[in-house]
Image (cartoon, helix red, strand yellow):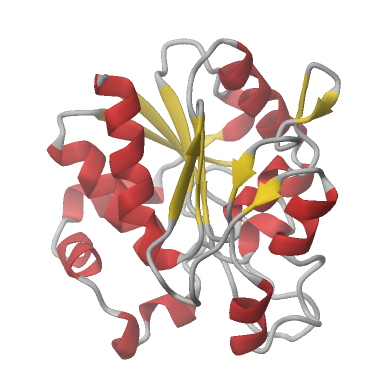
Amino acid sequence: MKILMVLTSHDQLGNTGEQTGFWLEEFAAPYYVFRDAGAEITLASPKGGQPPIDPKSDDPDNQTEAMTRFKKDSETQHLLAKTEKLGDVKADGFDAVFYPGGHGPMWDLVNDENSIRLIEDFYNSDRPVVAVCHAPAVLQKVTYRGQPIVKGKRVTGFTNSEEEAVHLTDVVPFLVEDELKRLGGNYEKAGDWADFTVVDGRLITGQNPSSSSSAAKELLKLLQG
């Protein structure tokens, strides 16, 4: 199995002056699910090189087993520091693409033509597309047969109430839940911060950070089935 993971290069949280980026658990947990299953993983980001880690995702209260493992894993840290430039990456040769969230993708990957093309290439060739937490936002401008890719599909993503809980409702460019509904997605959710992943054909979405591992496991089921 060859899996492409696409991370944000955006590090500014709107006009707040605070830093953002990708959410560490949403990278680390799926990464080790894939690696432990023997997958070959390639990392990419719009700018290439080291993508920004959202500092809040590394708070002492947010530590997980996967994050602890990552911090002891110099090989993976080195790999992360040298992500490939997204514009240089093609869907050819990969079995699936996985987008970790964090708030960063809402500013860069949503509008990134390379990302949009890549998702369409994967989806049009019957290969799975996975996005977790805020990353379903990257599907906003992706189309399939002339319609939004999420139209008529069961999907999930960071909920309005979760965004409210982190006090960023007025900071983000749009709300993931509202946008998925606007695009015609059949939006589903569980309770705030619950592990909840939705599979509809080759589109897999996870609600929040705690859903990142289950989303990765659902992808493995598709690829190994």
Q: What residue do we see at 24% from left, 38% from top?
A: 34
Identify the image quadrant of the C terminus: top left
Identify the image quadrant of the N terminus: top left
**Residue 174 rendering spot, x and y as whole percentages:** 81, 65
Can see residue 46? Answer: no
**Residue 45 rendering spot, x and y as whole percentages:** 55, 43
Q: Nearer the viewer, residue 168 or 177?
A: 177
**Residue 218 rendering spot, x and y as whole percentages:** 33, 39
Can see residue 72? Answer: yes
Q: What residue do we see at 37% from left, 78% from top?
A: 58
Q: What residue do we see at 79% from left, 44% from top?
A: 111
Left or right: 157 as drawn, with respect to 225:
right
Q: Quadrant of residue 123?
A: top right
Q: Quadrant of residue 102?
A: bottom right
Left or right: 20 as drawn, with respect to 93:
right
**Residue 22 rendering spot, x and y as whole percentages:** 51, 62
Left or right: 111 as drawn, with respect to 137:
right
Left or right: 26 as drawn, with respect to 8:
left
